[in-house]
Amino acid sequence: MAASGRVALVSRSPGETRIALVEGGSVVEIHLFRDCRPVVGSIVPGLVIQHLPACQAVLVDIGAEDPGFLPVKGSPGRPPLPEGTRLPVQVVHEPRRGKGARLGLDVSIAGHGLILTPSRPGLTFSSSLRDPGQRELLQACLLPVLCAGEGLVVRPEACSMQPDALIRELDTLRARYQSVLAGGTDCPLPLSVALSGRHVEDVVCDDADLLLKMRSAGFTVRLWDGPGSLLSTMDCDAVLGGALARRVPLGAKGCLWIEPTAALTAIDVDSGGDNPDEVNVRAVAEIARQIRLRALAGMIVVDFIAPQRGGARPAKKALAQALEDALSMDCVPSTVLGVSGLGLVEIRRDRTRTPLGEIILSPAQGGEADILPETSALDSLRAALDVLRSTRAARVSLRVSPVLHALLTGRLAPALEEAGRKAGSPVGLEIVPSYPASRYEVA
């Protein structure tokens, strides 16, 4: 593994794919993909269940915890889509806590080098593909094979693909679209989503089935054959735990307090009795790191410590500039808006995925947030397989709370079945009525 380069570590467990992006030997991003949660680009069969006339939208049941929000416009006095209508919809924005996914009707099917756009005919090129010579070669290859009314967007990755590989990918995209029209689901590979706008030199995966899917999509991937688990090589569990904590240490005394709310994320710099100016300087790099690691997005405000000497506003403007420079290394666009009248540094970061805390934790109630039952249910399956591997037992079972049992036999039933396939026999479940919501034990 190229520890000093850029590496993607892809780990599969029942119902979930985890991807850690490593740069210079440190984990800089962790992406969690749960099969029960739709990701951007997923196309799923939907059922219109409610009109929202004031919003010119409808709510659509897509099989997730919350219905999706689909903006539509109809004729005056007539609903745009009758309740009970079934149709394919594409996830435009992932669901947030208490809000369903934002959906669209204009679907597109993405491959490694091409994107099929059935409702937008013609051949277009990614803005990143600027070389006129490359565009001309790709156009000569693809235009003759486009069907009437069919559209394609050509990605920069297409430049490294042979003409026959491009044609094969186009045929695959067409087949995927026909499956969608027949009522099927089409989800992008987690690696495709995690690497959007990012470049890595090495991809390592610990699951043979997922590895084959990634290779068939055009990725160069190698299978992990080292000792222990793949993610443990970078101590990802500890990194993830730190990314969920409210308090982040800054040396011996100082720290950051990170408080997500429904409207914004507040970050407070606390000197802890250390030199305020030195703590502020240390805080800049750590704030940029935490924003990227936690996938914080939307409005973020930072309360730096008032300087010991000199004007507070000029000092905070300098800190805002330093923070802008630190955030420039992030591939997700963000804007440092400056210092507010209250002396807070304001940042706006594009929302490209759900923050880690919203996926793993329940809302905090006056203290540290609790683990979501969904998280515990998937953790229990991972723990069961770990016990099987370490003990070489013939089978394994779980003692779970009523809440976890309802999840594992309901929305997470496919994950339970996947665990059984990996274990070689079904994973048993035993309900313990006295267990709190997120408790489980491997038996």
Image (spheres, helix red, strand yellow):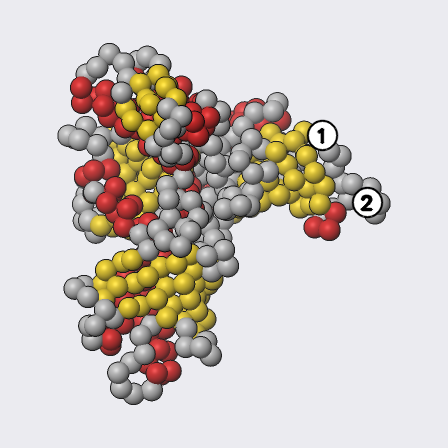
Residue 437 on image: x %, y %: 40, 34
Q: Amino acid at mark 2?
A: Ser
Residue at which label 2 appears: 75
Q: Nearer the viewer, residue 370 or 190?
A: 370
* Residue 434 against residue 357 in the figure, above or below: above
Residue at which label 1 appears: 84
Q: Earlier in the sequence, mark 2 or mark 1?
A: 2
* CB within 8 Å, label 2 to label 1: no
Which residue shows up at 18% across the image and 22% down it?
390
* Residue 75 against residue 340 in the figure, above or below: above
Which residue shows up at 36% across the image and 53% down it?
367
Which dot, 2 or 1, sits closer to the camera? Answer: 1
Which residue shows up at 46% across the image and 57% down it?
261
Which residue shows up at 40% across the image and 55% down it?
366
Q: Nearer the viewer, residue 181 or 288?
A: 288
Residue 118 on image: x %, y %: 62, 36
What SS does tag 1 mark?
A: loop
Residue 411 in the figure: left or right of residue 107: left
**Label 2 packing within 10 angstroms: few (<14), some (14-19), many (20+):** few
Residue 290 image-quadrant placement: bottom left
**Label 1 packing within 10 angstroms: few (<14), some (14-19), many (20+):** few
What SS does tag 2 mark?
A: loop
- The answer to whether any part of residue 44 appears in the image is no
Q: Amino acid at mark 1?
A: Gly
Q: Nearer the viewer, residue 252 or 11?
A: 252
* Image quadrant where one finds the N terminus: top left
Q: Given the current orientation, which residue lies at the most extreme right position?
A: 77
Q: CA distance from mark 2 to mark 1?
A: 18 Å
